[in-house]
Amino acid sequence: MELWLFPGLHLCVHKSLWTAKNLALGGGLLLLLAESRSEGKSMFAGVPTMRESSPKQYMQLGGRVLLVLMFMTLLHFDMNFFSILQNIVGTALIILVAVGFKTKLAALTLVIWLFGINIYFNAFWTVPAYKPMHDFLKYDFFQTMSVIGGLLLVVALGPGGVSMDEKKKEW
């Protein structure tokens, strides 16, 4: 491969990881926005109404899907035991949160898993402050903590109406 292709390849990979992380932050904000939206009032107080799809439910779905993009940036394709374990566990949890099956448990497990990985890989406090790597690790650390906050919103509020957990209630 030509030497001049490496900077361009590095830029493409770095830019796609940066974009995925920022979309994950957007997912957390979308979940917060969905929760702040008020539901429409029923015409008759105390009378149940037919369940209909609302924008809030689709915003929660979009927020869940965008949040799991963060885990996609953490996939490693090394052939050591820890990387393989991280990829398998992460992918399983990504799928569970995205489709909304056992969402609260999967999101809580993702929070714990992501927090451990964040402490291990983004330990900016171990790098002297005058080195540029300190700033990069600090940025990644707090960005990942923001995504953990979004996942905690999923744990607290549930998956929303467009999820397998909600469909199980109808069966």
Image (cartoon, rainbow, N blue to C red):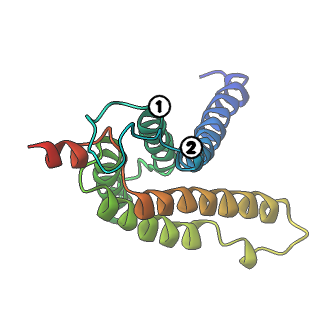
Q: Which residue is mark 2?
A: 37
Q: Seen in the image, is 90 located left or right of residue 118?
A: left
Q: Nearer the viewer, residue 30 or 75?
A: 30
Mark 2: secondary structure = loop
Mark 1: secondary structure = helix
Q: Position of residue 130 (x, y in %)?
A: 91, 69
Q: Which residue is mark 1?
A: 55
Q: Quadrant of the N terminus?
A: top right
- Outermost residue toward the front in this view: 44
The alpha-carbon separation of the residues under discs 1 and 2 comes to 9 Å
N-terminal label among 1 and 2: 2
Q: Amino acid at mark 1?
A: Pro
Q: Seen in the image, is 34 located left or right of residue 92?
A: right
Q: Quadrant of residue 142?
A: bottom right
Residue at the image point whose x is 57% and y is 62% from the top? 149
- Outermost residue toward the right in this view: 130
- Do the CB atoms of the residues marked 1 and 2 lie less than 8 Å apart? yes
Q: Position of residue 106 (x, y in %)?
A: 32, 60
